[in-house]
Amino acid sequence: MINKRVETAINEQINAELWSAYLYLSMSAYFNEVGLNGFANWMRIQWQEETAHAMKFFGYLAERGGRVLLKPIADVPARWEGPLNAFEEVLKHEEHVTALINNLMDIAIEEKDHATKSFLQWFVDEQVEEEASVQEIIDSLKLVDVKGNGIFMLDRELKQRVFVDPSTAE
Ligand code: FEO
């Protein structure tokens, strides 16, 4: 049976992951609207990833005999000033998620829950990758000149992103 404090924290994380999914789906809609379909694709894949993160926590709670409690998902923004602004918001959000994961890890350590510590390590590593991939896109966006040269190449590149289910990936 899972520790109650850990159970509550994981339920909060499920909500945070689903909010992240919702945020990126909103960004996908925004990019579709402004005609950047590659960016929209990247965000749609991100939505799938975040949903998979939530389900990874969901499955773990069930496996440990915990109770999943789904709370309402708060509103998300729907407008950004442009691709750079949107991706800067993504980075800010992912840094926040990293802090949430670190906090969860602190709780697991305090509660001497070794199984949860082991489970969370995957998310600690995942956050490093998430922040790095977003930073890379921000760096590319900063190279786009005032006339927008480069944006369509980047859009084509982001169109190539495909979903890899994190529950099956090592
Ligand atoms: Fe589920 Fe982007 O962290």
Image (tube, rainbow, N blue to C red):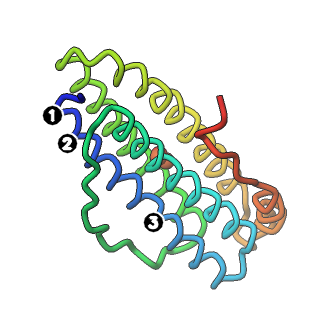
Please name the residue shown 58% across and 62% down the image: 84
Task: Answer whether labels 1 and 2 touch (C-beta < 8 Å).
Answer: yes
Residue farthest toward the bottom in the current orientation of the protein: 33
Q: Nearer the viewer, residue 7 or 23?
A: 7
Gap in angstroms between the C-alphas marked 1 and 2: 5 Å
Residue 62 image point, x, y percent:
36, 41
Which percent across, then down, holds residue 147?
75, 73
Q: Residue 28: which quarter of the image?
A: bottom right
Find the distance from the CA under tag 3 to the CA under tag 2.
23 Å
Q: Which residue is mark 1?
A: 5
Residue 132, compared with residue 118, is above or below; it is below
User: What residue do we see at 18% from left, 28% from top?
Assistant: 3
Vertical relation: 7 (above or below) 75: above
Q: Is label 1's Cβ within 8 Å of ligand 1?
A: no
Q: Which residue is mark 2?
A: 8
Earlier in the chain: of badge 3 and badge 2, it is: 2
| Quadrant including the C terminus | top right
Number of other residues with Cα within 10 Å of mark 1, as a class: few under 14, some 14 to 19, many 20 or more:
few
Crowd band around label 2 with a 10 angstrom C-alpha radius: few (<14), some (14–19), many (20+)? some
- Give amino acid for label 2: Thr
Find out if the beta carbon at label 3 lies less than 8 Å from the nearest ligand 1 atom.
no
